[in-house]
Image: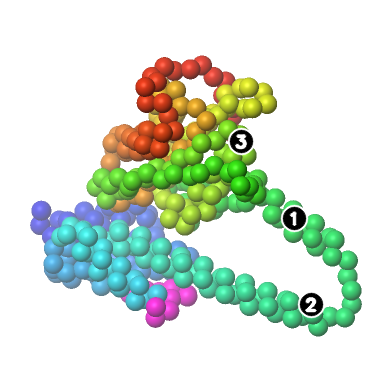
C-alpha cells in the first residue's frame, strides 16, 4: 500500500476515534486534543510510516522538560514497534498517559503544598474548635469511592463504590498474559470471591491500577453463592463494549463457573476487530480461569441460578 494511502486511511481512523478532538491541518499535519488543556501536533515526514517517525509539538499546561523527553522517547519506541506501519494512534495514547501522569504529579504536589499551608495556619491559630463535625464530614466523604474514566470516548460509565477496607482475608488477584491482535491488547484478571464485599474490593482494587484504569473497556463478570441467603448472585458489565458482558456471562454459565470475579481489559489499538473482539474477551477470561485453577475444566454442565441485579 502506498504511503500516502496509508496516511490518509490513518487520518480517517483518527477522525473516527477522536471526533471533533482531531483536526487535519494538512495532509501530513494533524492536531489532536487529548485532554483538557493538552494538545499534540503531529508532523509526518515524507518517510513516514516506513522509515521516519512523526515529529510532534506539545501544548500542555504542566509539561516539563522531562515530560517532553518521555514523549519523544515514546514516539521513537512506537515507530520502532510498528515496524513500518502507521503508529500515530499509539503515539497519541502513550502521550496521553505520560501527560496524565504529569498532571497527577502536579496535582499531588499542589495538594501537599496546600496541606502544608493549612497545617501551618492551624498551628498558628490559638482558638480551640470542636473537631467532631470536621471528622464526621471526612468520614462521610470516605464512604464512597468514585471511578471517573479519563475520557468519554469509549462510553465507559462513571462508577461509584462503597469503600471497602482490606483485611488479611481478602482474595488474591491473578492476572493473565496479554493477548494482542491488530494492535489491540487484551488481559484478564480474576479472583476467588464469596461475598459482595469481596466483589467490590476486587473491582475497586483493579480500577485503582493506573494501567487498567486507562483501558478502553474493562468487561466484568462475577458469580458467588451468598453465604446468608444461599442464593446464587451473579452479574456482568459491558463497560461500553456493548454485548461483551452478556457473551462472557453465557460462556461462564456453560462453564459452570462459581465463586469467581473476572475482568478482561482491552486497550484499543486503533483498528476495529469486528466480532473477533468478543472471542478475545472470552478466550482471555477462560484461559486465565483454567490456568489459575479457578474453574473445574472437566465441568461442562450449566446450573440454574437466581440473578442479582445491579
Where is 297 relative to 206, above or below?
above
Q: CA distance from mark 2 to mark 1?
A: 20 Å
Q: Nearer the viewer, mark 3 or mark 1?
A: 3
Q: Tell me the distance, in whole angstroms, between the alpha carbons under discs 3 and 1.
A: 22 Å
* Residue found at x 28% / y 47%: 180
Q: Residue 218 at x, y = what percent?
A: 44, 44
Where residue 285 appears, x then y in whole percent? 38, 36
Horizontal side, residue 82 vs residue 148: left or right: left
At which x and y percent is residue 225?
58, 26
Residue at image position (20%, 64%) is 80
Residue at screen point 79% across, 77% down: 122
Q: Which label belongs to residue 123?
A: none
Q: Which residue is mark 3?
A: 196
Q: Are marks 3 and 1 in contact (CB under 8 Å)?
A: no
Please provide the residue range marked out in magenta.
Answer: 57-66
Locate the C terminus and report the quarter of the image it occupies.
top right
- Which residue is denoted by mark 1 in the rendering? 139
Q: Is residue 115 left or right of residue 30?
A: right
Count of labels in the image: 3
Q: What residue would you read off at disc 2? A: 122
Amino acid at each position: 500500500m502506498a504511503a500516502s494511502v496509508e496516511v490518509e486511511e490513518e487520518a480517517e481512523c483518527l477522525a473516527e476515534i477522536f471526533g471533533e478532538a482531531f483536526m487535519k491541518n494538512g495532509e501530513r499535519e494533524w492536531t489532536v486534543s487529548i485532554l483538557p488543556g493538552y494538545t499534540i501536533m503531529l508532523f509526518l515526514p515524507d518517510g513516514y510510516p516506513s522509515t521516519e517517525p512523526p515529529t510532534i509539538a506539545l501544548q500542555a499546561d504542566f509539561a516539563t522538560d522531562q515530560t517532553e523527553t518521555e514523549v519523544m522517547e515514546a514516539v521513537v519506541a512506537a515507530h520502532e514497534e510498528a515496524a513500518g506501519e502507521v503508529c500515530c494512534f499509539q503515539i497519541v495514547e502513550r502521550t496521553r498517559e505520560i501527560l496524565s501522569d504529569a498532571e497527577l504529579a502536579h496535582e499531588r504536589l499542589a495538594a501537599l503544598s496546600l496541606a502544608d499551608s493549612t497545617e501551618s495556619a492551624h498551628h498558628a491559630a490559638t482558638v480551640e474548635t470542636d473537631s467532631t463535625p470536621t471528622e464526621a464530614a471526612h468520614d462521610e466523604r470516605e464512604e464512597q469511592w468514585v471511578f471517573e474514566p479519563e475520557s468519554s470516548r469509549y462510553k465507559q460509565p462513571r462508577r461509584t463504590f462503597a469503600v471497602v477496607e482490606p483485611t488479611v482475608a481478602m482474595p488474591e488477584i491473578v492476572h493473565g498474559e496479554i493477548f494482542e491482535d491488530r494492535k489491540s491488547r487484551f488481559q484478564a484478571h480474576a479472583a476467588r470471591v464469596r461475598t459482595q464485599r469481596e466483589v467490590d474490593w476486587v473491582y475497586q482494587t483493579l480500577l485503582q491500577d493506573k494501567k487498567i484504569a486507562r483501558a478502553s473497556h474493562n468487561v466484568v463478570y462475577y458469580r458467588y453463592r451468598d453465604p446468608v441467603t444461599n442464593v446464587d448472585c451473579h452479574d456482568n458489565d459491558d463497560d461500553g463494549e456493548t454485548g461483551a458482558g452478556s457473551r462472557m456471562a453465557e460462556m461462564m454459565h456453560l462453564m459452570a463457573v462459581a465463586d469467581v470475579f473476572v475482568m478482561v481489559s482491552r486497550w484499543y489499538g486503533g483498528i476495529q476487530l469486528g466480532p473477533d473482539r468478543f472471542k478475545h474477551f472470552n478466550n482471555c477470561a477462560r484461559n486465565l480461569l483454567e490456568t489459575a485453577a479457578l474453574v473445574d475444566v472437566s465441568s461442562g454442565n450449566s446450573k440454574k441460578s437466581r440473578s442479582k441485579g445491579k
